[in-house]
Amino acid sequence: MIDKILLFPYWLTLKVRHFMYDHGMRKVHVPDVPTICVGNITVGGTGKTPHTEMLIRTLAQDVDWGAKNIAVLSRGYKRKTRGFQQVVADGTAKEYGDEPLQIKRKFPFITVAVDKSRREGCDFLADPEKVMTSKKARKCRHKEFPKADLVILDDAFQHRAVRPTVSIVLVDYSRPIFKDHLMPLGKLRDLPERIAAADIVIVSKCPTYLDAWERSKWAEALGLNHFDATTCSGIRKNGKQQHLFFTTIGYDTAQAVFPEGDPRYTYTQRLILFSGIANDKPLRMFLSGNYKIVRHLEFPDHHKFSKADVSSINSAAKAFPTSVVMTTEKDCQRMRDCAAVPDNLKQRMFYTPIKVNFFSDSDRETFSSTLNSFLK
């Protein structure tokens, strides 16, 4: 109610926009290949990139889709290039954005591309020959890639001009949408009622244990009745079946940001952490279990590291000469673009790979079968 009163112009704009799409007053494009949209209705921090990577693993391992050509399409937030670009592993975050580059480096066997227009990007991936002849893609540096059989759309839930085959919406466990407000009063960038339009909802960044009672309470708060933990699904008021899953964040062994990295530093007991993501609290909690965090440098999300930033990190490293310098997996993509990193700092700089986990093998198998039922 407070959103309707204090933020009425913004609330009304969103209502009218969705009404026009829902009632055919604005055109909606259906891509020629199956698409999976991964998005949210809040501003950052729900774990879209780790869940996109989880989807890639699931699709690559699945019997029905393992032999298919998977592609990921992103806007490429804060990149300096324009138009459609195919991401290459030896490129830079400046060219493609940190998240698409991270995905390409972890999964070199798939096609990763960036394009502000999701519609044109999907068309290019479905028919690579269009890239060769299109004027809008004339600045694409790498034009040869296989035809995509499936496209994962990163952060495209608000992009109503394209209708995906499957829509997945993430909700942060620590920031429930039913307790939030529209920006700038809160973190919502879309109406909370839009959650009903998703095919699958995933509550991300859950604690390591979540009992059946709390899962059912979450389902109820999200508008799902008769939630069945076995099928991970419930029924909305309009009779639509919606699937609800819960995931946790896990971290793997620290990896060197630069080739010069000396793994002996990871055995120290002191740690300097720097991060430029929306929410680094889960990482801090994980690292605190093995290290004493002696210095924590926070930067804005998707921050481009400058010489002054590197100097600040290096000063902290000099103040604690035996400490390891740790960052996030996403930040390391942008740090590699920085030419001002001294060699001694490169030896001490590591990142912690992030991974999404389901609570059980049964949940993971149910998610895989649910995904296949939509794609078929």
Image (cartoon, helix red, strand yellow):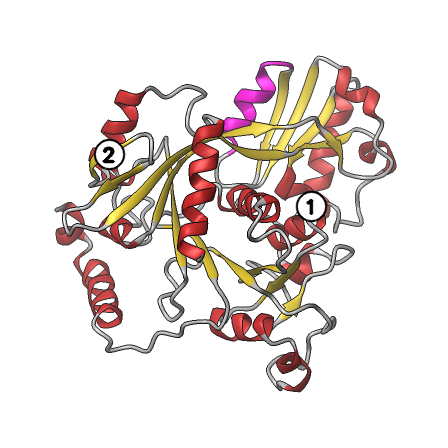
Relative image position of residue 272 (x, y in whole percent) = 67, 25
The answer to whether residue 212 is magenta is no
The residue nearer to you, when weighing 288 against 121, is 121
Amino acid type assigned to the residue bearing label 2 in the image: Phe
Q: Give the side of residue 153 with respect to residue 98, left or right.
A: left
Contact between labelled residues 2 and 1, with CB atoms less than 8 Å apart: no
Q: Residues within 10 Å of mark 1 (few under 14, many from 20)?
A: few
Q: Is residue 221 above or below residue 263?
A: below
Predominant secondary structure, magenta span: helix
- Residue located beneath label 1 in the image: 106
Q: Is residue 1 above or below residue 116?
A: above
Relative image position of residue 64 (x, y in whole percent) = 55, 52
Residue 260 sits in which quadrant? top right
User: Which range of residues does the magenta coloring cover?
Assistant: 280-290
Say which quadrant the C terminus sits in. Answer: bottom left
Q: Residues within 10 Å of mark 2 (few under 14, many from 20)?
A: many
**Residue in the picture at 65% in, 28% down:** 252
**Residue in the picture at 40% in, 48% down:** 43
Q: Is residue 147 above or below residue 321?
A: below
**Residue in the picture at 65% in, 79% down:** 131
Relative image position of residue 368 (x, y in whole percent) = 47, 42
Q: Give the side of residue 131 with respect to residue 345, left or right.
A: left
Q: Secondary structure at mark 2?
A: strand
Amino acid type assigned to the residue bearing label 1 in the image: Lys
Relative image position of residue 246 (x, y in whole percent) = 39, 33
Q: Give the side of residue 59 with respect to residue 266, left or right.
A: left
Q: Give the side of residue 15 with respect to residue 149, left or right.
A: left
What mark, if any, has residue 227 been given in the picture?
2
The answer to whether residue 282 is magenta is yes
Instruction: Give whichever of discs 1 and 2 has the lower sequence position.
Output: 1
